[in-house]
Amino acid sequence: MAKIDRGALITKAFKVLRKHYEPYTYVERPLLEQMVFALCLENSPHDAATKAFEVLKGGFFDWNEVRVSTVEELAEVMSMLPEPKHAAHQIKRFLYSVFETGYSFDLDPVKKMNLGAAIQKLEKHQGASPFAVAVVTQACLGGHSIPLDKGALLAFQVLGLASVADVAKSTVPGLERAIPKNKGIEFGSIVHLFGAELNASPYSTNLHKILLEIAPDAKERLPKRPPKNVPPPPPAKTPAGKPVAGKGAAPGKGAEAKDVRATAKGDAKGRAGEKVADKKPAAPARPPVKESAAKRPVADKKQDKLKPKKKATESLTKRKPR
């Protein structure tokens, strides 16, 4: 990929987006309210964010009541936003963090701090997204920071101005250098309007035409629809035509399944036999049996053959006379 002139491409994007969108300006608000509005504005059209903020401010007694309300309750009253639950969750986290830090909802003392220290102070609060901090930096602190939400980051990624790592960090290198500070709010607002539409309709042909008008070589990077109803691959088969066990074969019908069942039955029989053997009483010891000549070892039989036999005369002499 050829090296691009980042400054020239950002300036061209500014000129093209100017033809399609009207910039907006921020209403002057206290710093805390500006942050709540920015959390409504993230990933949402400007008109919808304004209505959601007015509902929160006018429909609840104070910001503490918003803080203790559930996410479901807040999402219900902010249903005009594209992502009401996400916005409600972020607002609730931010208000909790602010209250636990100073037990009040007054953040205006942050304006008296240096710009760098003020930004770090805001970033420490839970729920304060990089987009919301950038909005407050522009609207309340007088700093130069372009707010970038999900749709705007996608647009700069398609244009080749942001890598995957840049999108993860919510930054576009060289953006603040290419856009002067006095044009920061105007540029940020039209980029946000375009990004909100791209986030809602990433496959819109009209939005793709605007991106290609800025960078004609971005065609390959445009969001593409995923394929519909892709059929699953057929199961692999053995040479005999039967499904391979574990790849489409019915459970319990393969040779492996038979071996498993046979092993399981053998184990079950073995366990049953062990249990029966354990339950049988020990047999009593039998008295010793005299061994007969037939059952004696062969060595003993040979010894008997070697003994001298008695003669018939010896037996007659031993008889008593009548």
Image (tube, grey):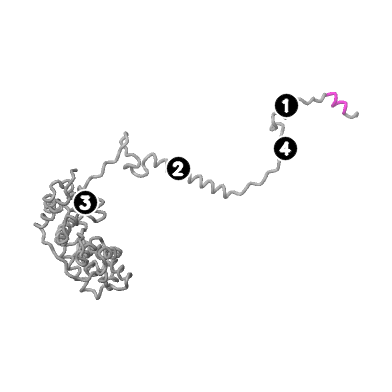
Amino acid type, label 3: Ala
Q: Residue at x 18, y 45 (%)?
A: 3
- Residue 67 location in percent, x, y? 28, 70
Q: Nearer the viewer, mark 4 or mark 3?
A: 3
Secondary structure beneath label 1: helix
- Mark 4 or mark 3: name the one nearer the start of the chain: 3
Residue designated by label 4:
290
Secondary structure beneath label 3: loop
Which contiguous range is marked in magenta? 312-318
Q: Residue at x 31, y 71 (%)?
A: 99
Residue 316 is covered by the magenta coloring: yes
> Counting other residues with Cα less than 10 Å from the Cα at mark 1, is it few (<14), some (14-19), or many (20 or more)?
few
> Counting other residues with Cα less than 10 Å from the Cα at mark 4, is it few (<14), some (14-19), or many (20 or more)?
few
Residue designated by label 1:
302
Q: Nearer the viewer, mark 1 or mark 3?
A: 3
- Mark 1 or mark 3: name the one nearer the start of the chain: 3
Contact flag, marks 1 and 4 (Cβ < 8 Å)? no
Which part of the image, by quadrant, shows the N terminus?
A: top left
Amino acid type, label 2: Thr
Residue designated by label 3:
162
Residue 254 in the figure: left or right of residue 192: right
- Mark 1 or mark 4: name the one nearer the start of the chain: 4
Amino acid type, label 4: Lys
- Residue 111 location in percent, x, y? 24, 69
Secondary structure beneath label 2: helix
Residue designated by label 2:
263
